[in-house]
Amino acid sequence: MNGANRTATAAAQRSVRDALTGRQHRSITATVFMVFIMASTAVGLIALAVLLFTVLQDGLPYLDPVLFENGPSMDPNIAGARPAIMASILMAVVLVATALPVAIGTAVYLEEFAPKDRWWIRLIELNIQNLAAIPSIIFGILGLAFLVRGIGLGPVLLAGALILGLQMLPTVIIATREALRAVPDTVRQGGMALGATRLQVVRREVLPAAIPGIATGSILGLSRAIGETAPLLMVGAATFVSFNPGLLTQYTVLPILIYQWIRLPQEAFQGLAAAAIIVLLAILISMNGVAIWMRNRFERKW
Amino acid sequence: MIGALAVCAAISILVTIGIVIALLVPSLQFFGEVSPVEFFTSTDWAPLFKPASFGVLPLIVGTLNTTLWACLVCLPLGLATAIYLSEYAHPRARAVIKPVLEVLAGIPTVVLGYFALTFLTPLLRDLGWQVEIFNAFSAGIIIGVLLLPTVASLSEDAMKAVPSALREGSFGLGANRFQVSTRVVVPAAISGIAASFVLAISRAIGETTIVLIAAGQLPQTTMRPGSTVETMTAFIAATGAGDVPVGSISYKTIFAVGLTLFVITFVLNIFAIRMVRRFREVYE
């Protein structure tokens, strides 16, 4: 106890002396800590750089017109990704037409119209937060049980799109709600003071003002869905689809094709997988580029 | 019009109800044929063989194996990144680093699986560690890299919510940045940080594609990092992707394992959501 007291007194004396002499209080621990957190931050950045470098190095030699023109084949020299690329694009279109309106509708209802103090509204909110964190494979099980086998839709593109749509709902809902919340209440009050109804105010004032945020969130959700693999394995995305996909036909998308190519033993297929990864990343990066551009171009400060 | 919007909001509830029904009904049938005691205590998982055996423990241990390495990467590094971004970084450095980390979080998991299998595993072997081609360690480390930005971003949000008066008060008493960060800001943001940790653990348990590609499909009750394992998610995906006849016992195992996975992640998620609420209530 005596020893502890002495140490404390010495520390107090030191800090008073430092304060009086204006000397900055530094310690080795503090320096080591700073180096540690900077190095930790660098780990994420370096991992991304190495990942992109590896993919480019493996994939660039295989990135040729054949990849965009041909369908799948067991011969790596003529194997291509055309049906998969087409299906990924079609999938995105279906998601924009189905999941986005539902997600934005939910967000508008919860943010602008719902009676916030009711238990069932709080339940919906809790439910959305939980859905956002449910493993994607569970959505695959939902699709398998209800869509593919239950109502007998079979392993078609529409079934996959519906499941990805349900899975992206929470992301888009949460982002849209944040965008709506950022529109100040004075906009709503001003509109209503001029005699507009709540619905008119939301449609003509609030929604247009929130569009940049909504678009950013939508693209984020969409790009996650386009890169998703696991739930589509469950709802029967096939490997060897050589025709251009329709809504009610079998299909394969880019991530599924990449997954299947990775699993093939020949080395050339690893290269093809890397080339298809480059195509997938290019699609995702350009989508995100549009989102960032929209955010910078249209975002308003209130 | 408002009615239509309310219907949209109700869809999210229907999704949850649908998930519960989809998991529960076949699982109940499954437990009619296989005793829950065998399911949760037997250490032999061979549902597709004859004679079949249904002990889920190897899958749970396999999941723990990959999750452990993921957490060893994403929890400390994510928290450290959050402290750097929130307390140390120049605004200009922060403006560059944050979006780059968001890109990392947005990389599709199939790409990360490719990276684990064709870059990390060969690298470990070159370094002289004789890991299996498919091993829990590579998959786990890469899941950790995937989740690092999530932990960093959520923890940073929690730290940003700590009022600056607390920091200024402690600087005023002569504390340096290290002391302010570790003794004031982190303790004040602890429930938000804990929530980000729990959420990351839940996502690591539920990650499918990376383990399917890089950790393999061999159910083994082992925590050895270099071993091939099968996680719960990998079993579900591999079996669901195959042609199992509807109504067969192997078909129903998908749902029994799915229900186990759902319950584990559900409990973790609710826990995380409640902790986030708590730190919001304190400072907003």
Image (cartoon, rainbow, N blue to C red):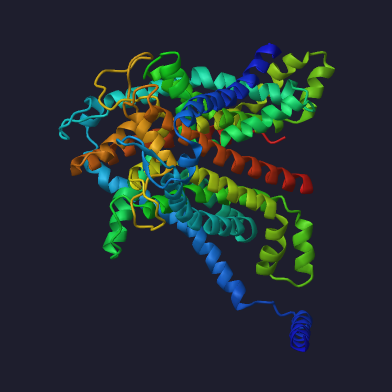
Asked whether, in this view, residue B244 is left or right of residue A21, the answer is: left
The front one of B217 and B4 is B217
Q: Residue furthest right?
A: A193
The front one of A57 and B52 is B52
Residue at the location (58% across, 26% down)? B16
Taking the image as drawn, is residue A180 in sight?
no
The front one of B12 and A44 is B12
Asked whether, in this view, residue B247 is left or right of residue A292, the answer is: left
Residue B195's spot in the image, x, y percent? Answer: 63, 48
Residue B276's spot in the image, x, y percent? Answer: 68, 45
Residue A10's spot in the image, x, y percent? Answer: 75, 86
The front one of A180 and B237 is B237
Residue at the location (54% across, 59% down)? B76
- Quadrant assignment, res A150: top left
Residue at the location (74% across, 20% down)? A113
Residue A67's spot in the image, x, y percent? Answer: 24, 31
Question: Looking at the figure, which quarter contains the N terminus of chain A?
Answer: bottom right
